[in-house]
Image (cartoon, rainbow, N blue to C red):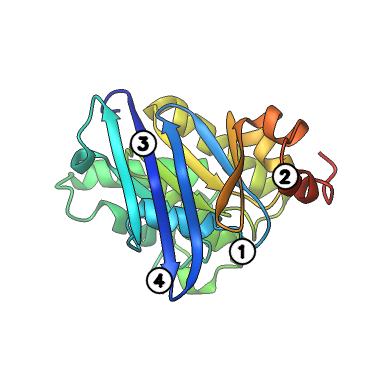
Amino acid sequence: MSGHFCVKLQGLRKVYGERVVLDIDDLGFEAGRSYALVGPNGSGKSTLLRVLSGVIPASGGAIDVEGDILRDDVRVGYMPQKSYTFGFSVARNVALALDGMKLSKSEVTARVERALRDVGMWEMADARGSGLSGGEAQRVALARLLVRDLDVVLLDEPTASMDIAGTLLAEETLERYRERTGCLTIMATHAPSQARRISHDAVMLAAGCVVEKGTTDQVLSHPTSEAGREFLSYWAV
């Protein structure tokens, strides 16, 4: 952990042609806490994660880092909605994340084993990545993300293809990782029930705008906006 910090968003916008897909006036994320991004499909959750990760540029506004770390020194990891695995072994798929870090072979082996054990995939370390199910591929992608020590972890529906047991194991793994590293975790999820399990705070988006923010219980139990109440009316939370 590189020290305490906060990620601040000011006037953040993402525009495609004439379509505004993200328009956030003011939003902050604090290191050491876990956040859930919730809202209907097309609300801007994935776009926000892609902008925060640097995968796509913002159209306007600023993303600043305040605290004990410079923005350029923040180690960011991003797991997209569609997981990918290469045709070589599961272990090599995870070890790829450590390439270029100048670690000894024994350290790489130890880190890969720990990451795969954490997601319940160690027994499949020698299996080919191309032969995995959707849920197994997501577990490997999660292991590949968490095999490094990160300051910010961004996850876009990371358990969407997992069964119940795999989902709960992934959630427990993420919580242990956050406690160990002190990282900031931001996870998009379509399910308010999952948001309750994995997050301290929640941000609800609708049409690219923040319509609710606060503790997870406040956002999911006491929405103040019409958009928030409409979204939650479809869920038993």
Dot 2 or dot 4: first in sequence order is: 4
Q: Which mark is residue 131?
A: none
Please, what is the three-letter code of the amino acid marked with disc 3? Val
Q: Earlier in the sequence, mark 3 or mark 1?
A: 3
User: Which label number is shown at residue 42?
Assistant: 1
Mark pair 1, 4: CA separation:
29 Å
The answer, for residue 124, to whether it is visible in the render is no
Q: How many angstroms separate mark 2 from mark 3 (CA)?
A: 24 Å
Amino acid identity at mark 2: Gly
Q: On the rendered structure, is 14 left or right of 106?
A: right
Disc 2 + disc 3, Cβ < 8 Å: no
Neighbourhood count class around disc 1 (C-alpha, 10 Å): few under 14, some 14–19, many 20 upward: few
Q: Where 29 falls versus 116 (above or below)?
A: above
Q: Residue 193, located in which quarter of the rendered image?
A: top right
SS assignment at label 2: helix
In the image, 47 versus 59, the foreground residue is 59
Q: Residue at x 48, y 54 (%)?
A: 23
Where is residue 100? Give x, y as percent. Answer: 17, 54
Left or right placement of residue 48 versus residue 6 in this view:
right
Query: Could you tell me which secondary element the residue under label 1 belongs to?
Result: loop
Q: Say which amino acid is labelled 1.
A: Gly
- Disc 2 and disc 4 in contact, CB within 8 angstroms: no
Q: Secondary structure at mark 4?
A: loop
Residue 128, x across and y down, in percent: 46, 69
On the rendered image, what quadrant is the N terminus found in? top left
Q: What kind of residue is marked 4?
A: Phe
Provide the residue designation for mark 4: 86
What residue occupies the far left of the structure in this picture? 102
The residue at which mark 3 appears reads as 7
